[in-house]
Image (spheres, rainbow, N blue to C red):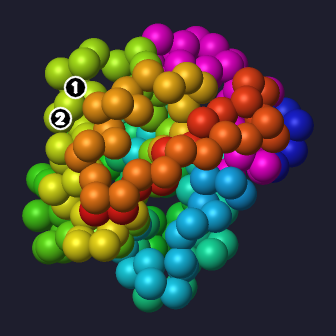
Amino acid sequence: MNSRLKFSDHIKLIRNIRTSGTISPSSRGLIRRLLASIDFSKAQCVVELGPGNGCITRELLKRLSPDSSLICLELNNDFVAQLNALNDPRLHVYNACASSIRAILDELDIGCVDFVVSSLPLAIIDDEVVTAIVESVRDNLCEGGRFVQYQYSLNNWDDIKPAFSEARLGFTLLNMPPAFVYDCVK
Ligand SMILES: C[S@@+](CC[C@H](N)C(=O)[O-])C[C@H]1O[C@@H](n2cnc3c(N)ncnc32)[C@H](O)[C@@H]1O
């Protein structure tokens, strides 16, 4: 990505701070940390929540096999257009709320997903929407499926942890600001 493009991504995030919850895209270090527990040889279907400018999406596409699917749910129209421009046949981009995973999987005739990767700013999303998103993630993961999420605070950790059979908390300094990484197994 060139620096001009990066600058326009910052502007989009700042303009939409109330839904983006940040002023800059995730660093490479944070993305590596977030994806570290994903076994890409078992990733047939992955859902990404809040892909924004696609910094994590591009890394997922690099690692996913040619016959896999990546389904992105993003609220912001500008980012949806930017993601569609990636023009990858494995990528399905929806201008939709993260709580609507089931409706989208039904449209694509998919039963359950192997991994959910999220950079949603849960701390600034209304509690009832967060509850609906967490239920939607858990209910649509296959048994043994994994949910990874980064956050700048520990908000919502106590709500997310009991929804999964295993939940680990990590932390990385390789981002500004530093971030917690939630790693949960259904
Ligand atoms: C912190 S940004 C993350 C962007 C990028 N993935 C990254 O890591 O830099 C959060 C993104 O979530 C999107 N978003 C916020 N609420 C959402 C919701 N309920 N459903 C889907 N996307 C949402 C925002 O539009 C924004 O693009």
* The C terminus lies in quadrant: bottom left
Q: Is residue 20 magenta?
A: yes
The kind of residue on which mark 1 rests is: Val
Q: Note whether residue 114 is visible.
A: yes
Magenta stretch in the rendered image: 7-31
Please rate how many residues cluster around mark 1, counting C-alpha atoms within 10 Å: few if below 14, some from 14 to 19, many from 20. Answer: some
Relative height, residue 39 to residue 129 (above, below) = below
Relative height, residue 80 to residue 125 (above, below) = below
Residue under label 2, please give it.
Answer: 132
Q: Is residue 116 left or right of residue 59?
A: left
The CB of the residue at mark 2 lies under 8 Å from ligand 1: no
Residue contact at pointers 1 and 2, CB within 8 angstroms: yes
Please rate how many residues cluster around mark 2, counting C-alpha atoms within 10 Å: few if below 14, some from 14 to 19, many from 20. Answer: few
Give the image location of residue 132, x and y in percent: 17, 35
The kind of residue on which mark 2 rests is: Ala
Give the image location of residue 29, x and y in percent: 78, 49
